[in-house]
Image (spheres, coloured by chain):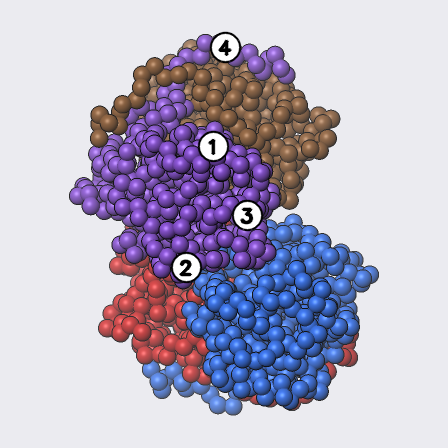
Chain colours: A purple, B brown, C blue, D red
Amino acid sequence: MSEIRKVCVVVASRANYARIKYFMKAVRVHPRLQLQIIAGASALLYKFGMVTNIMEADGFEPDWRIHYLIEGENLTTQAKSTGMGIIELSTAFQELKPDVVVTVADRYETMATAVAASYMNIPVAHVQGGEISGNIDDSVRHAVTKLSHLHYPSTRRSAERIIQMGEEDWRVHFTGCPSIDILIHSDLTPPDADYFKDRGTGIPFDPAQPYVMIVQHPVTTSFGRGAEQITETLLSMMDLPMTKVVLWPNADAGSDDVAKAIRAFQFEHRNANYTYHINFTPEIYASLLAHARCLIGNSSSFIREGAFLGTPAVIVGDRQQGREHGVNVRFCGYNRYEILSKVRWQIAHGPYPSETIFGTGNAGEQIAAHLAIAQLDIRKRLILKEPMQAPIELAEQQV
Amino acid sequence: MSEIRKVCVVVASRANYARIKYFMKAVRVHPRLQLQIIAGASALLYKFGMVTNIMEADGFEPDWRIHYLIEGENLTTQAKSTGMGIIELSTAFQELKPDVVVTVADRYETMATAVAASYMNIPVAHVQGGEISGNIDDSVRHAVTKLSHLHYPSTRRSAERIIQMGEEDWRVHFTGCPSIDILIHSDLTPPDADYFKDRGTGIPFDPAQPYVMIVQHPVTTSFGRGAEQITETLLSMMDLPMTKVVLWPNADAGSDDVAKAIRAFQFEHRNANYTYHINFTPEIYASLLAHARCLIGNSSSFIREGAFLGTPAVIVGDRQQGREHGVNVRFCGYNRYEILSKVRWQIAHGPYPSETIFGTGNAGEQIAAHLAIAQLDIRKRLILKEPMQAPIELAEQQV
Amino acid sequence: MSEIRKVCVVVASRANYARIKYFMKAVRVHPRLQLQIIAGASALLYKFGMVTNIMEADGFEPDWRIHYLIEGENLTTQAKSTGMGIIELSTAFQELKPDVVVTVADRYETMATAVAASYMNIPVAHVQGGEISGNIDDSVRHAVTKLSHLHYPSTRRSAERIIQMGEEDWRVHFTGCPSIDILIHSDLTPPDADYFKDRGTGIPFDPAQPYVMIVQHPVTTSFGRGAEQITETLLSMMDLPMTKVVLWPNADAGSDDVAKAIRAFQFEHRNANYTYHINFTPEIYASLLAHARCLIGNSSSFIREGAFLGTPAVIVGDRQQGREHGVNVRFCGYNRYEILSKVRWQIAHGPYPSETIFGTGNAGEQIAAHLAIAQLDIRKRLILKEPMQAPIELAEQQV
Amino acid sequence: MSEIRKVCVVVASRANYARIKYFMKAVRVHPRLQLQIIAGASALLYKFGMVTNIMEADGFEPDWRIHYLIEGENLTTQAKSTGMGIIELSTAFQELKPDVVVTVADRYETMATAVAASYMNIPVAHVQGGEISGNIDDSVRHAVTKLSHLHYPSTRRSAERIIQMGEEDWRVHFTGCPSIDILIHSDLTPPDADYFKDRGTGIPFDPAQPYVMIVQHPVTTSFGRGAEQITETLLSMMDLPMTKVVLWPNADAGSDDVAKAIRAFQFEHRNANYTYHINFTPEIYASLLAHARCLIGNSSSFIREGAFLGTPAVIVGDRQQGREHGVNVRFCGYNRYEILSKVRWQIAHGPYPSETIFGTGNAGEQIAAHLAIAQLDIRKRLILKEPMQAPIELAEQQV
């Protein structure tokens, strides 16, 4: 084992980077850790905001760049992209020879990373495991947990779940979510209107004026209905007398449909009070979350950062249903009248008190500190502590 | 939902087919099920016995054939093969449009199948989940459990584990292992010496004479030591005055090394009492298991079929360590003297009473019957029944 | 050999279909041919106009759909997409078992098709071989010629070139270009303004008013400069008092850049007299070519269909430089003043007489008729007729 | 352009290395060149002799290792391996950023290299282009010529052909074949019997005794008949009272069949006078070629090195039919009696005078010297010097 541990972070999307940036900073300054960065998939694409440009501006030069998204953004290409990801990442791991690979959350890049590394006997550290959202991402997230060797969950309850699923105690460390770190380390003042002058499309954006934010991704288990769902949300806000800041969706199956629906809406209502953006730096995104009158859609940032910031949020549909959340959140169906009504209620309510269910903002440092000393052992044991009370007679009875 | 359910079975190796054959038979005759067969990976290769020839002789014509093994059989190619498997299987699933996909056990083909199907919103039924062997396959097996929607474990204890890991009760059905079915449906009389005249290499094989069987696969977590390990086992048997029936290893990382070591041994001791075989039909393999004086190595068949047949077995190394097993099994290190001593002890002991921990031989029928009526719901919930007694303060204390 | 020959056409982009549609029609009605259609790559993508929808409206239901474009549209992903195309097409060929595969032109889909088929011993028929454009596509086109077994070039000179490159005479048949067929079979009347009401973006398009067309693809050998080049062309037309009809670029390396530049131009000049379209049916595209006052950019349709229709064209840059063309064409550098000046000259000139260098409009029928009787022989001979006059002493002298 | 040119050599098989070794040596010592080595495909596999071990012993440490052979060795997997090769090589080229890529001969690795590099705008130098063998490899070789920017053919006639196919004169340099270089630089004394004691299988090999060499690869255009063909050759030599040195075949489609047939022969005739080898170092292989009484099979080394060494050769079947060759060669059908009779004739004849049609043994140095100064221009022009005498009226007449 080398004295200095090589910690390889796979950044594969806009969201990935925001969540992991402060962890990467902590690794970079740690005397016993060496940072390796693989940038892949939508993190390299213009249409998802070319995250690598932002990373480089922050001083994070990727050691490796891989394209592995198969165009199409339907269910088949999502599977194929995972396959390509494994093929390409295994080459990268072979060349970079990391001591441990860090992967975040629950998307297909996460799965590709976990599969490639675990087949190559490289320990996997998983951030944001153990969460429940109620949709298909859960299966992937829990499968990644089963392939991972160290777990850094974002909430206490998630840590408990990981252990209940049979992971050994010593592999699980509640650190809070590194996406909170950014809220502590930046001053959360949005840029002024000038900054946005040449950025985005639609009306010019002035954060000094009241605004709400709309971020709504396609939901893979209801593939094919994303266009209709986002359109309902966009229409719901037509009469709200505030700026609507809309973010383009990320690279999930169905995101082409959603993007197309937004584009159609944009042209049909080209003078309406909406401004459209591909990407923000993590700091600017955080500042916009902090000062929005309401957050609308299904981004998990509304729940994580939202809880800490106390920004009122209306979560549309079932993508986050079942997820642990703070008091700032209200859930809502895909119905324009219901959405508008709940958004008005939330705006009227105003900011909520800050909560720390997703940590206190030092997750990145904690994870780095632990990775420097953790036992990197790929032989896992399944520890199921509680004996079952009742024997299982199910199969006999039923079949 | 179609009236007739299309059940797609992915057969990707010699072992796969033996385990799943009686389930395939049950699907084929079920009035509400239609069988789809995908043959892939080592099931299509001569050097692993061209399992498709045996399948076709049994009347199972594959609907789809895919090659996706990247040559090299090291850790990197194992990861890449998984990636290629996902890419190719997703094409097959797209064309065959199955209602449910059935996958077996814990190898990388199993992982590729589960990832491809679950990303395409196709329900996955997993056979042999919930088991513990103590090696890296466990991680893959439990990850596949997390990606699967119906579970048909082979033992009661495995069923319990799957539920403890958070799967919903109604998705889990203890059916026993379909590899036992074959023991019930065939007469277990080995072919006579004539049958083997033109088969295999080494000395001619006559099952009427006393023999032991050696099946020892490489262990991926100790990649690079497979050659030495198999050589120790082969040498241990030099002085045993019986025929040694040796099977070539399957397509894991490291199998090239093991095959090379066997070949070297074969040439160095070309007149010794060993006979070498690539493959048997499932029925002949079962009959040979039934009449062997002892089974030596790390094949899981020694544990599953072995328990039911009561054939004495010496399990070498840690590939199966921790696996549930019957009284027929003794464990042993990679040491030729220890192996020989334990094999002699087992031969002296002779057959053990039959045990049914892996079922009573009707698993295939039970699984088929259940698949015809099961709810095919891809939205899973994580059910962790037992609240944790102690809160987790780990991270705070340690880091 | 089957009585009925299975002719497999790979349609992989918007341009592919327009070029090959009348050939596909001829195959469909031929008594000794059976049509197999593989739709792949950008033909399946919304952002390139979802050509499969148009094909299905024409009664061409694909037998196979494959996604194999790796997102990124740079030089690396172009290579990787070719690789994925080979992997996916070989599966399709294995299942469809065509007697002959037909591929068109010179893009990476063409290369992938030719490589996959020729390695699988399937005869390849190549349409539009032997042409010279002066850019990197030439290398690919000539390499495809070397992998093909039957050649259906679009011009007499191309046929000569193919033979001079060493192909056997009997494999080469000058048929003209099937993209001309469409001009003969449709009435070339553009739809009225109503048809375009909900189509495209920018100002509403009324073909009854004078208009010019702009189609400018990125040039792979000057990768990275596509944005600047298209911007120059778009700006050049600002003062032209006509509608400018702009098509989004196809899926080459660099097309993301070009699309981004068009989008930027569109927003900066949102009230300017430009209308932007992703795709037209082949018939509508032909009618628009026929009635445009001038064609501006680097689409090869300006040269092929343009020669037959006599529509004035200004070819910008070097993508088509060196290509055989009619009198309707003037070449031009990437300079806005030069472009504008030459476009004005061409508009003032008005329509040119029709030329038949690209055939008389029955290429599809000719190719189909020939494929029904052609010898399908994969063993090629290299026939270089002219002995060289001077011996080659180059290497000795120079090195 | 960097001062020092980075020359990237892709070594993908046992034969590749022998052919290119002295070129690599010349690059390594050239003050203006930097050598980059990619080792891939069968060069990394034990069953093809693990060429990388030999390379490392010669001081050539690969900069990159890639596995991309899909197991199966049939026509479909050959196509898929090419696809995977392109995907993996494009990653390597992206990281290594070579100024020029060197590829040899005509196999699918060569095609993958040429496609990947040319799509990435990296100049390709092709060694051994322009040759004619009369089988399907010709198509690939000529297609690679069309994708290449510098040509280093092995014979004058090949150089002429490349120019006749339309390549610009200045891109073509007759250098002779680098496989001849090794014959000049080594002393061609075979090792003694001791060296072979633990090498190979079959009877012990003593090069001091008279021997013939058998190297016969599968022929892809007659896929499926390789086993029968090699068996005929092996049987033909049964009565020849000399040692028969047999090499296992390389990784073409069909090589599994051939290897299986050799293995079957080996076991059936285990006491016959045959010795079987996976690989030799290039020097030892050259020395064995030099001292064999006759060379039997279809290896191109029998023609290249054979011509220079004057070793009598009997070329079986059509794999090399049509290839330029010296007086040392006699051709022969797949018939054991014909083979034996011609081999006896050749042995009786004894050594032929040395010929230099494949060069005088300084090809590697010449190529390196030229690469250091050559213009690296990716924009090719097609130069077809001789106008055709007769116009082409083919299509009109026939269809």
**For discs 4 and 1, the disc positioned in front in the rendered view:** 1
Disc 1 with disc 2 on a shared chain? yes
What chain letter is assigned to the residue under label 3?
Answer: A
Q: Which mark is residue A238?
A: 3
B338 to C10, vertically: above or below: above
The Cα atoms of the two marked residues, 4 and 1, are separated by: 40 Å
Out of A191 and C189, give the one closest to the viewer: A191
Residue D120 shown left or right of residue B68 in the figure: left
| Residue at image coords 37%, 47% | A288
Three-letter code for the amino acid on which mark 4 is drawn? Pro
Q: Is residue C104 visible?
A: yes
Residue at image mark 4: A391
Residue at image mark 1: A330
B389 to C1, vertically: above or below: above
Disc 4 with disc 3 on a shared chain? yes
| Residue at image coords 49%, 52% | A274
Q: Name which of mark 4 and mark 3 comes first in the sequence.
A: 3
Residue at image mark 2: A199
**For discs 4 and 3, the disc positioned in front in the rendered view:** 3
